[in-house]
């Protein structure tokens, strides 16, 4: 075992625990479920935390340079709502009472809908898949969110195209009054997910088998090109004070008689906590998924003599959650949080077909991963098949000139590397370098192998644990490579997909002309699509026992 691995991951692995399988089955069996969605679910699409959002908004109004420096300094220390109040004050001063809200909303929409599709996080898609599977199994599912964006609704439309309307339910936006002024349905360019206000229309929609309602309790902002509604938003401290009781009552009404699953939330939103406290004596179960990676660390694990300190911190978070009637679900990584939601979807599909999700049954995460490895090993490592690695090296080398064109790096040093989820088991949680565009090696046992854990210096591991495409600067850790673009590779099948490797592209320090930069999102999106296709070709396609769909 890597010397730091015990401190950075729990044992047994999250998906190997019978307790995890029990939770998956329990959630999948619910007939009335409220899914509360926080900012963490769609952050891979928005690409910005609340603090980053505030800093963006601080550039949207006129102040002198000294005052702007003070504002940016305060953004690092003030609580989020205090920052929001300051920003709102400056917008009103700069644009006047009549136009301030419109300017603020436009600035927020620009930030949350800037082109970040290249990040390709899995949490939104997994949430849509879970809602769809539960709905297909006969459950009543409602999503409640404080997010302004409609990325969940967009994800449902994309998944319906990819996997079929018979498998994926459409998610449709609902906005609590008095935030709504619906735009006419025949407005040119109107979105398919028309936004409705809470009321009789919502009651009818909630009972429809075709839609899963998404209630935006703080208002919703749509991309400019598909606006179907004009809404207010809850933003500043005054907004929260004025709306908190109404929002809490709206959430409380949803929580009262239904099971609750909280995703992507820091469990610090006052209306959510108020609604939880008021319904703490309810009989329906309630869970919150909260990765260890999102918890603060008193000390970095490798700096403490007590490797159990991370577990001690998790226990305190669990104790707090219990005060609100919540069972805390604590995976190690962000990627495991979204995978957990996808496993619930898989369990619901199995249950509808008369089968059960359980550890060691052939249907669970570990067994599917083992089945993939056995098929890939047979195709690549068995005697007489060692030519497969040479083919992978050659395939990466041949792809490199095409990728150079995509990123405008004709004269820069670049390399492609394919990392594989190597011999996965309870005791073996590693990525191993399988192929590189820079050369070959005859002995697979001598290839670099690194543990899957937090705080890894390897971009491949970080992309794996985050569960999304990663653009990482080496920040002086490498004299040769200035940045890495890392793309997780998943098996196929909407409800059974899992990450089995990572493909990375490294760019040299002298790559001043390269477009591997957030300034070129369209380039990153094209690069990501090409790398996913190549990674699946080498890790997933043409296996003798493909992952079931």
Image (cartoon, helix red, strand yellow):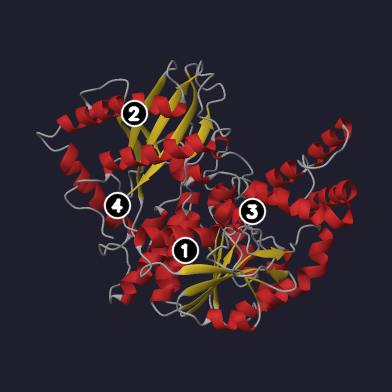
As measured in the structure, the alpha-carbon distance from the residue carrying label 3 to the one carrying label 1 is 23 Å
Please report whichever mark, 1 or 2, sits nearer to the chain's N-terminal start: 1
Q: Residue at x 56, y 21 (%)?
A: 476
Element at label 1: helix
Q: Which residue is mark 4?
A: 369
Residue 3 visible in the picture: no
Residue with the mark numbered 2:
448
Query: Residue at image x 59%, y 45%?
Result: 47
Of mark 4 and mark 1, the one earlier in the sequence is 1
In the rendered view, would you say 543 is above or below 73? below
Task: From the top left corner, tell me how far across and down residue 529 is, in percent.
Answer: 40, 41
- Which residue is at the front of the view, 542 or 456? 542
The vertical placement of 460 against 109, above or below, is: above
Q: Secondary structure at mark 2?
A: loop
Q: Is 345 left, or right, of 543 in this rendering?
A: right
Circle 4 sits in a helix, a strand or a loop, which is it? helix
Which of discs 3 and 1 lies nearer the camera? The answer is 3
**Foreground: disc 2 or disc 3:** 3
Query: Given contact means CB atoms under 8 Å apart, are the residues at marks 4 and 2 in contact?
Result: no
Neighbourhood count class around disc 1 (C-alpha, 10 Å): few under 14, some 14–19, many 20 upward: many
Q: How many other residues sit within 10 Å of disc 4, few (<14), some (14-19) or many (≥20)?
A: many
């Amino acid at each position: 075992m890597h010397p730091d691995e015990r401190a950075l991951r729990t044992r047994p692995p999250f998906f190997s625990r019978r307790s995890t399988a029990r939770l998956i089955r329990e959630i999948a069996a619910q007939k009335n479920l409220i899914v509360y969605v926080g900012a963490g679910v769609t952050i891979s699409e928005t690409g910005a935390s609340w603090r980053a959002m505030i800093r963006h908004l601080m550039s949207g109004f006129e102040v002198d340079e000294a005052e702007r420096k003070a504002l940016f300094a305060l953004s690092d220390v003030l609580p989020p709502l205090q920052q929001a109040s300051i920003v709102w004050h400056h917008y009103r001063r700069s644009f006047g009472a009549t136009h301030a809200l419109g300017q603020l909303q436009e600035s927020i929409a620009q930030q949350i809908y800037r082109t970040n599709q290249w990040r390709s996080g899995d949490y939104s898609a997994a949430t849509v898949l879970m809602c769809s599977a539960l709905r297909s199994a006969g459950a009543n599912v409602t999503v409640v969110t404080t997010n302004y964006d409609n990325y969940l609704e967009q994800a449902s439309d994309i998944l319906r195209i990819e996997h079929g309307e018979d498998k994926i339910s459409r998610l449709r936006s609902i906005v609590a009054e008095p935030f709504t002024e619906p735009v006419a349905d025949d407005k040119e360019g109107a979105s398919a997910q028309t936004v409705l206000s809470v009321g009789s229309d919502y009651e009818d929609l909630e009972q429809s088998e075709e839609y899963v309602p998404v209630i935006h309790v703080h208002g919703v902002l749509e991309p400019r090109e598909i606006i179907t509604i004009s809404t207010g938003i809850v933003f500043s401290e005054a907004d929260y004070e004025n709306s908190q009781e109404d929002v809490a009552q709206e959430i409380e009404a949803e929580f009262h008689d239904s099971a609750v699953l909280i995703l992507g939330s820091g469990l610090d939103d006052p209306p959510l906590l108020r609604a939880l406290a008021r319904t703490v004596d309810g009989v329906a179960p309630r869970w919150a998924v909260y990765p260890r990676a999102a918890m603060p660390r008193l000390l970095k694990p490798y700096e403490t003599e007590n490797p159990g300190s991370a577990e001690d911190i998790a226990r305190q978070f669990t104790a707090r959650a219990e005060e609100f009637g919540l069972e805390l679900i604590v995976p190690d990584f962000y990627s495991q949080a979204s995978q957990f939601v996808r496993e619930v979807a898989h369990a619901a599909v199995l249950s509808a077909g008369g089968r059960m999700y359980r550890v060691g049954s052939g249907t669970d995460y570990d067994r599917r991963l083992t089945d993939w490895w056995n098929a890939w090993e047979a195709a690549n490592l068995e005697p007489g098949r060692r030519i497969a690695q040479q083919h992978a090296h050659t395939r990466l080398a041949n792809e490199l000139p095409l990728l150079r064109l995509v990123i405008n790096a004709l004269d820069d040093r670049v390399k492609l590397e394919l990392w594989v989820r190597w011999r996965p088991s309870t005791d073996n949680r590693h990525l191993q370098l399988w192929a590189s565009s820079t050369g070959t090696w005859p002995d697979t046992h001598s290839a670099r192998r690194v543990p899957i854990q937090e705080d890894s210096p390897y971009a491949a591991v970080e992309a794996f644990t985050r569960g999304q495409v990663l653009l990482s600067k080496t920040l002086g850790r490498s004299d040769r490579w200035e940045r890495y673009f890392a793309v997780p590779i998943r098996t196929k099948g909407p409800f059974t997909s899992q990450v089995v490797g990572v493909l990375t592209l490294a760019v040299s320090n002298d790559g001043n002309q390269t477009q591997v930069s957030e300034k070129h999102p369209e380039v990153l999106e094209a690069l990501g699509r090409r790398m996913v296709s190549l990674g699946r070709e080498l890790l997933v396609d043409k296996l003798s026992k493909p992952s079931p769909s």
